[in-house]
Image (cartoon, rainbow, N blue to C red):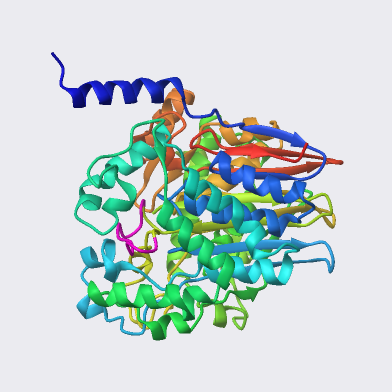
Amino acid sequence: MPSRQVQEDDHEIRDFTAARTPKPQRVAASGDGMVSTQHYLATEAGVRMLAQSGNAVDAAVAAAFALAVCEPAASGLGGQTMMLIHSRSPRRTFALDGSSRAPNRTSLEALSRERRRRGYKATTVPSTPAVLGYALHRYGTMSLPEVIAPAIEYAEQGYPVTQLQQKLLSRVQKHMRTSSAGPLFLKNASRVYRIGERFRQPVLAATLRRLAEAGIEDFYTGQIAQMIHEDMARHDGLITEEDLAQIPWPIERRPVSCHFDNMRVVTFPPPGAGRTLVEMLNIFSNVPSKYRHLDSPEGALLMAHVIRQTGRDRRDRPYDPSFYAQIPKKAMLSVDYAKRIARSSLKQVRTAGETTHLSAMDKSGNVVALTQSIERVYGACVATPELGFLYNNYMLAFEDQDMSHPYYLRPNAAPWASVAPTIVLLGRRPWLAIGSPGSRRIVSSILQVLLRLKRRTPYEAVAAPRLHCSLDGTVSLESSRMRSDIPAILQRHGFVIDERDPYSFYLGCVQLVVREDNRFIGVADPRRDGSAGGPR
């Protein structure tokens, strides 16, 4: 006869099976604005702001706070946030560089790679609260309590765990069990939540409520800051009240851009990876149209060469963003350099963390592309028990060999970022907001969608099979969804094939919003839990 506990567990499973997780709306249309995020509740939060006459910044900030609750594997208050904003009035497009900072007591000699992977020494000073607060204050129209209300609601009431969330939490379960994050993110501090089981975060709800009442500064100079400082001291962490008091407000920077066909593509400057996207597009501007067909063997082969070459260029040409604007010759943005790479790549063809992204538009013409992260899946796997959010492990994102490198690990340094939130304009009018998580796969994911948008619907362009080529020549691809001769031609040209699942988590997750006349179309990548939505 089964034990009472087994009977209770079986009853619990039946309850959760009966109340399955909602099916995300992957494609949406609206005449009053649009939001696309990696979780349906975050999309709902952004849509609520638009429905209450908020603008795209209000919607994006509300969605970002909600993602800190509903997608803890990828983002949260303990991470960093980068934003690209197009303002309708005054008309301008600009980046908010929300880089986090290494603590003042940082010393590479005292930090092994494992210590930078997990634990209290792995985290940089979180910038997400500062960036969201700054964006809302300067460019939003609603109050902090208004935009943070949905996140508080989701943290208090909880939400059903998805299959993806269960899978990701299983990856770090053994680390969570022995850390301060276990009681917050594991059921009874010991096991992974089942699919459909409701996950509540009352401690995080209290922290969010404190932010709403006391303001963003409380995270850095108030009660929350004091709790972070004390917890870090208890666990021999590096962040102190002095680090927090130097609030990492974002720096407004000029984006990088290029023209591709009839589009002007505006994307994120250093320390982000927008330069790589610009170089890729400049290369594809100089190849015959038949090689832009990514579903052909020749097109896939050219894509692999381009991704590999531009990745090498980014590695070999790092820039400090504060110094970058003063450099007269910027090879990665040069059309002439791109032409040379295009000729070289064509010759070869003929002869041969984790992150989250959201996009938002309003009917007035304001646009936001926002990417935020806690670096690897579930970040540092530690959390202050009285605050409820995970700390990032951005200490892994620094250079640790070359002391002259602009992103070398030193006190108060900013980590190197792979993000590329992007806005595309037709004439002077914003047409598309796009971005993706995925570390080094971010830019290649965006590029493949941009190329496919010429011939496919937005959803088809996002859902189409992808590939990525690493610097060592390994091509990761959704091979079962591609022509069988594509892996073969790649292998003949010396690439190593890494077969991935269909709709692979590894190959990014594009969130896209496009404006077509007076309608907005939103697309959420089927590779994760995202959804799109707009006011009705």
Q: Residue furthest left?
A: 1
Q: Is 253 situated above or below 104?
A: above
- State which quadrant residue 492 falls in: top left
Camera-side residue of 355 and 25: 25
Q: Give the image location of residue 17, x and y in percent.
A: 40, 21
Q: Give the image location of residue 503, x and y in percent.
A: 47, 32
Q: Residue at the location (81% across, 43% down)? A: 32
Camera-side residue of 65 and 406: 65
Magenta-drawn segment: 377-387
Q: Give the image location of residue 30, x and y in percent.
A: 78, 37
Q: Residue at the location (45% across, 44% down)? A: 468
Q: Within the magenta stretch, is there residue 26?
A: no
Q: Residue at the location (48% across, 29% down)? A: 21
Q: Residue at the location (22% across, 52% down)? A: 175
Q: Is residue 76 visible?
A: no
- Quadrant position of the N terminus in the picture: top left
Q: Give the image location of residue 130, x and y in percent.
A: 55, 71
Q: Is residue 16 visible?
A: yes
